[in-house]
Amino acid sequence: MDRIQKITAIICALALAVSSFGTYADNVTAAGLPVTSDDAPLSLETTKRGVAKNNAQKLKLGKKTQGRLVTGDDGECYQITLKSSGQLDIHLEGAAGKLATRLTDKDGKGWAPRRKTSDGKQTYQLKKGTYYYQVQIAKGAQIPETGLVYAVTATFQSAKARFEGNDTRKKAAKPLLDKVFYGHLAQNAPVEYYKFTLKKTSQLSFTINTQMTDKTPETFVVSLYDKYGQIWSNWENPDWRRYDGEWIWDWEEFGMEQGLVEILPAGSYYVGVSIKRDGNGKVPASARYGLYEIYTSVKKVGLSVELSHKQAAYTGKKIKHPRVTVKKNFKKTYYDDWYYDKNDWLYDIYGITEGIRDWDGYDHKTIKGIGRYQIRQQRWSSPHNMGDDAYSIFTVTPIRGKINCISSKKKGQVQVSVKKNAQSTGYQIQIARDKKFKKSVKTLKAAGTRKTIKGLSHGKKYYIRVRNYKDVKTYYCSDIAVPESIYGKWSKVKAVVCK
C-alpha cells in the first residue's frame, strides 16, 4: 500500500509541475522574455549527444511554441518542413546568453543564419526540404531550479521559384522565353543553372532583377557556359535596367538588374546564376541570398553570315577562306538602301584563338594556324536590327591522323605507332571490336607517337583509328579564354588480332 501511495504522490507532483510550468511560461512570455544569443556556445555534453531527430516535434509555421530546458537536458528539437524555396524567419525568445540554437538539414549539416537581429530573429534563405531546429543549454550557463523557459516562432515566405533542384548543369531548368520567371539562391544551393538550345546563330539575352537594393549587387554573378561546361563569359557588374516592354535605364522598386547579352552560334548553352566567391573560392559569410526574377529572350540577328564550309585542315600553307554569303533576315529594315552589293567584300576574318588572336585588323583575306576564326560582317555602323556582331565560326584543324603500324607482341596488349605531326599537342587513339566503333570502344590520348593498349581479350580482332589534336585557348565572347581541344579527321581504320 505504501508503494501505491508513493507512486500516486509522484504522479500528482508531476502534474502540478506541468500545470505550474504552463502558467509560468504564459506569464513570462506576456511580460516579454529577454532574447537569446545565437552565438552562445553549446555545452560539450550536449554537443556530443545532440538532439534526436526521431523525437523532433513538428513546428507549426506562424504559431508560437513554448518549451523549457532543465540541467542535464539534451535540449529540444523541432522539425520544420518547407514545401518550396524561400525565406525562413525564426524568432527565439528566452534567457539571454543561456540558450544556444542550431539549424541543420536532414543530413545533419548546419546552416548559420544569413541575417540576425538583436531581438532574437534569425533569417535563413533555404531550398525546400526538411530541417531541424535545435534549442539547447549554452555552455557554462547557470540554470535556475525552475529551468530555462523559451518560445519559438517560425514564419516562412515562399520565393515563388518555378524551379527546384537546378543546382547542377545536369538538372538545369529550361525556362520559357519572353516571360518572367522566379529564381531563388539559397545558402544550401548557392548556384542555379538554366539551359538554352539555339538552332542557329542568335542573340541570347538573360537579365536578372534582384531584391538587393543596397547598390552592391556584385554578389550575384551571371556566367555563360558551353555544352561541355567551359565558361565563355562572366557578368559581375550591374546593368541598371528592368524589362517592362522596353529597356528602362533607371532604378526600379524591385531592386537591380544584371545579366548578359551575347550573339552565339548554334548549340546548347548554360547560364549559371551564383554567389560571388572570394579569393579562396569560398562563399563569403557576408554573401546575400534571395529571390530574383529572370527574363530571357532569343532573337534572330538582322544579318546572318553563312559559310560554304566550316573547317579546313592545316597543311602549313595559306588556307583559302570559305565562300561567304551575308543574308538579311528581315523583309524590312531601317535604311534598306544601305544593303550590300553581293560583289563587295563585306566581312572580316578575326582569329579568336590564343596565338592567332586578332581584333584590330580589317580585310583579312587569309587564314593560317590551327584555331578558331570569326568571319563577321563588316558594317560596324549598321542600322537598327541589322546585327553588328553577326558571324560564323570557321575552324582550322590539324591534318588527318595516320597510323604507321599496329602489332600485338604480348598477351592482351596492342602496340600502336602514329605518324608524328609537329603542329599537334598529341594523338587520340580509339580501339573497338567493330569497324563502326560502337562495341567495346576505348578512347585514349597519347603525347608521344607510340602507345600500348592493355586489358584486351586474347585472340580477338580489334579495329584501331587515330587522329591528331591540338590544345588551344579561344576567346569566344569576352576576355575569358576557353580551353579546348581541336581535333583533326580520323585516320583510315586498321585491324589487328590480339595475342
Image: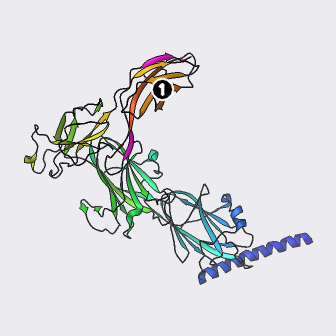
Q: Which residues are magenta?
A: 481-499
Q: Residue 494: within the magenta?
A: yes
Q: Residue 43: within the magenta?
A: no
For the C terminus, the image quarter is: top right
Q: Quadrant of residue 467?
A: top left
Q: Going by the image, does 158 lie left or right of 342?
A: right
Give percent across and percent down for residue 338: 9, 47
Residue furthest bottom in the image: 31
The residue sitting at 79% across, 75% down in the picture is: 13
Q: Is residue 37 above or below residue 55?
A: below
Q: Which residue is mark 1?
A: 450
Residue furthest left in the image: 337
User: In this orientation, which residue lies closer to the viewer: 73 or 394?
Assistant: 394
Q: Going by the image, does 42 lie left or right of 176?
A: right
Give percent across and percent down for residue 372: 30, 39
User: In this orientation, which residue lies closer to the viewer: 455 or 297?
Assistant: 455
Under tag 1, what secondary structure?
A: strand
Q: Amino acid at mark 1?
A: Arg
Give percent across and percent down for residue 168: 47, 48
Q: Is residue 327 visible?
A: yes
The residue sitting at 39% across, 40% down in the picture is: 484
Q: Is residue 179 visible?
A: no
User: In this orientation, which residue lies closer to the viewer: 20 or 276?
Assistant: 276
Q: Quadrant of residue 141?
A: bottom right
Q: Is residue 262 above or below residue 291?
A: above
Give percent across and percent down for residue 24: 67, 80
Q: Is residue 79 above or below residue 168?
A: below
Q: Is residue 324 above or below residue 33?
A: above
Q: Going by the image, does 144 lie left or right of 157?
A: right
For the N terminus, the image quarter is: bottom right
User: In this orientation, which residue lies closer to the viewer: 166 or 477?
Assistant: 477
